[in-house]
Image (cartoon, rainbow, N blue to C red):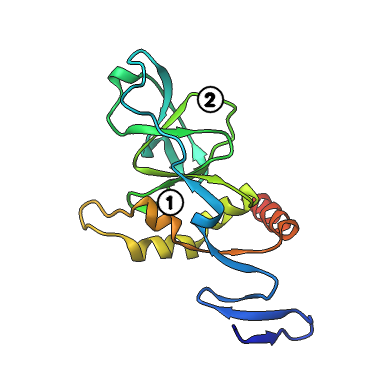
């Protein structure tokens, strides 16, 4: 059982975890416990004439800013165009994650497809904005940097993203935290 301490003057109890001190009523889990990773993909039986909007890593100019999509026909699409994306999903670039090509999709489109250079996180039983704000954190990027392999094309796997430790406060606190962080962004 993690050792509990009381913060000065707040009567809030904390416990020690591999991520550091967190309140005792928070859970420590992994992203994979609270998000489906790459839940839906296009397969080879997709109609060659299917049209979709493609998102590659260069489509994200800076964290959170999806600048463009390219409308493309499946038969002309790059072989990496496979990850289906829905509104509320979070894109995490698995290639050079330290560049933070991360975005939360808030588009109503149902015809979005991302490159396999992304891990697509679909939040489950967690506030999606809270999860996205955690993905933007230094803690998350540091974890991925420690998992990277390759020197010319440093990357992580989607399974590495799923294994990242994630502090989970009660849902009402998740919403408060994400609201504050979103306002700062």
* Side of 87 where 50 appears, left or right: left
Local secondary structure at mark 2: loop
Q: Residue 110, labelled with which disc?
A: 2
115 relative to 131, above or below: above
Residue 80 rendering spot, x and y as whole percentages: 30, 34
User: Where residue 88 appears, x then y in whole percent?
Assistant: 58, 39
- What secondary structure is marked by label 1? loop
Q: Nearer the viewer, residue 161 or 105?
A: 161
The residue that disc 1 covers is 100
Residue 43 seen from this side: yes
Alpha-carbon neighbours of circle 2 within 10 Å: few (<14), some, or many (≥20)? few
User: Could you tell whether 173 is left or right of 111 in the image?
Assistant: right
Residue that appears at 31% across and 25% down = 44
Asked if the residue at tag 2 contacts the one at tag 1, i.e. Cβ–Cβ closer than 8 Å, the answer is no
Image: 136 above or below 28: above
For disc 1, the neighbor class at 10 Å (few under 14, some 14 to 19, many from 20) is many
Q: Residue at x 59, y 27 (%)?
A: 108
C-alpha separation, residue under disc 1 versus residue under disc 2: 24 Å
Q: Residue at x 64, y 51 (%)?
A: 125
Which mark sits nearer the N-terminus, 1 or 2? 1
Query: How far from the left and from the top, in percent, is residue 133?
Result: 58, 54
Vertical placement of residue 135 versus 167, above or below: above
Residue drawn at (51%, 57%) of the image: 31
Instruction: Name the disc covering residue 76, or none.
Output: none
């Amino acid at each position: 059982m993690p050792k509990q301490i009381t913060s000065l003057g707040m009567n809030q109890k904390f416990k020690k975890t591999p991520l550091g001190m967190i309140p005792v009523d928070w859970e420590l889990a992994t992203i994979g416990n609270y998000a489906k990773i790459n839940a839906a993909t296009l397969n080879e039986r997709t109609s060659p004439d299917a049209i979709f909007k493609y998102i590659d890593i260069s489509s994200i100019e800076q964290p959170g800013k999806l600048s463009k999509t390219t409308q493309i026909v499946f038969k002309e699409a790059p072989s990496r165009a496979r990850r289906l994306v829905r509104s509320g999903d979070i894109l995490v670039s698995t290639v050079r994650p330290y560049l933070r090509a991360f975005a939360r999709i808030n588009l109503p489109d149902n015809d979005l497809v991302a490159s396999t250079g992304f891990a697509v996180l679909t939040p489950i039983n967690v506030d999606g904005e809270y999860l996205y704000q955690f993905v933007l954190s230094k803690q998350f990027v540091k974890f991925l940097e420690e998992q990277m392999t390759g020197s010319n094309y440093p990357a992580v796997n989607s399974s590495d993203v799923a294994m990242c430790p994630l502090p989970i406060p009660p849902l009402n606190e998740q919403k408060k935290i994400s609201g504050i962080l979103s306002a700062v962004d």
